[in-house]
């Protein structure tokens, strides 16, 4: 039986990959330090991957057809993984991010050869630095890397919203349910791509143990491009409530809340569309089967029906209230100024 080691394996994306690998008869081992439940049938190795000596002891004498790391963010993480896994696997899959692609973009249609540059977001720059190092390790030492770039991937426990506070997306949904205004960046008409986690997993597992994927970089997304207004409309459909959207320019939002600079100007403020020809060639038969309309409404309904997922975020809620109030105050001031000039 083919063997895969997943570093992580309990998140929105990695958990779906672990379940899919098990379905496709991969002997699946998870290396993670959290208390999150692992998929049934997976072996769990409780360890911190940064504890190199402890991991070496756990993996002594073991070898895997593929190793996939979902929690590597910096070059030092790559150096750690190369030391841990170079002699233990025939393929190392690094989970990067589509946010690494060029910002601002020269063309909204993205292929794997689109340049990597993101001056707005440290997270994306860290992923770019990891990819750069991995390319060097592949050229110099033959380290068998496959780089995978997800875009906005979600599932039943996570609804794709433009931004949220530190405690997740529930507070945005709660605002919709309470009839409070919900902020959307720009005019809500920029195009975005969201991918159901099980669809992503189908493509990812198609790369496991695939010799044609070694040395390659590939993104895995749906083929749909939808607007943010549509996304929030589908969230409302799942909740049975029409959202009250307030559109505020991305630059203004980043000035109001600087932490949004990366997620907005470094990612979601731009229209994107992905060319998925490469993943379809490497994993024949791959297709995103869950539409954005279906998946988003399903996820929103699931959160509304699952109290354990409803984590309140009072600070974010209060900030939204202030931001909306300040925005309309600014608009009122501008209207008054214009009226005075005209009189």
Image (spheres, rainbow, N blue to C red):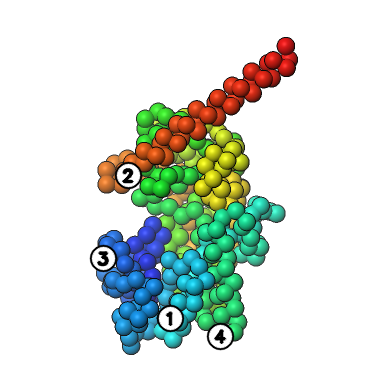
Q: Which residue is painted at 47% across and 79% down in the image?
A: 82
Q: Which residue is painted at 50% across and 35% down in the image?
A: 183
Left or right: 42, with 263 as reference point: left
Tell me the element at label 1. helix
User: Can you identify the residue that label 3 sits on?
Assistant: 40
Does residue 46 appear in the picture of this structure? yes
Q: Earlier in the sequence, mark 1 or mark 2?
A: 1
- Observer-nearest of 138 and 224: 138
Question: Disc 3 or disc 2, which is closer to the eye?
Answer: 2
Q: Quadrant of the N terminus?
A: bottom left
User: Can you identify the residue that label 2 sits on?
Assistant: 311
| View extreme (bottom): residue | 61
User: Can you identify the residue that label 1 sits on?
Assistant: 85
Position of 264 relative to 84 (above/below)? above
User: Can you identify the residue that label 4 sits on?
Assistant: 141
Image x and y of residue 76, in percent: 49, 73
């Amino acid at each position: 039986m083919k063997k895969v080691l997943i570093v992580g394996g309990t998140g929105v994306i990695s958990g779906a990959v672990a379940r899919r690998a098990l379905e496709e008869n991969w002997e699946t081992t998870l290396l993670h330090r959290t208390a999150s439940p692992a998929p049934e049938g997976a072996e769990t190795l409780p360890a911190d991957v940064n504890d190199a000596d402890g991991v070496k002891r756990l993996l002594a004498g073991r070898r895997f057809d593929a190793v996939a790391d979902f929690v590597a963010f910096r070059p030092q993480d790559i150096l750690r993984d190369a030391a841990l896994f170079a002699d233990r696997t025939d393929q190392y899959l690094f989970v990067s991010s589509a946010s690494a692609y060029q910002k601002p973009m020269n063309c909204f249609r993205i292929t794997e050869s689109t340049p990597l540059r993101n001056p707005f977001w440290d997270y994306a720059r860290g992923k770019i630095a990891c990819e750069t190092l991995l390319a060097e390790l592949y050229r110099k030492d033959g380290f068998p890397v496959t780089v995978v770039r997800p875009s906005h991937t979600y599932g039943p426990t996570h609804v794709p919203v433009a931004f949220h506070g530190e405690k997740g997306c529930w507070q945005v949904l709660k605002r919709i349910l309470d009839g409070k205004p919900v902020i959307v960046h720009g005019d809500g008409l920029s195009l975005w791509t969201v991918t159901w986690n099980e669809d992503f997993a189908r493509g990812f597992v198609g790369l496991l143990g695939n010799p044609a994927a070694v040395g390659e970089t590939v993104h895995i997304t749906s083929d749909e491009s939808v607007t943010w207004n549509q996304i929030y409309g589908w969230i409302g459909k799942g909740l049975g409530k029409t959202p009250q959207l307030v559109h505020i320019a991305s630059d203004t939002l980043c000035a109001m809340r600087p932490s949004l600079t990366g997620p907005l100007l470094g990612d979601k403020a731009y229209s994107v569309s992905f060319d998925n020809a490469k993943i379809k060639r490497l994993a024949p038969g791959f297709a995103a089967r869950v539409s954005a309309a279906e998946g988003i409404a399903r996820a929103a309904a699931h959160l509304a029906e699952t109290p354990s997922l409803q984590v309140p975020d009072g600070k974010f809620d209060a900030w939204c209230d202030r931001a909306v109030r300040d925005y309309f105050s600014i608009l009122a001031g501008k209207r008054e100024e214009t009226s005075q000039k005209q009189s």
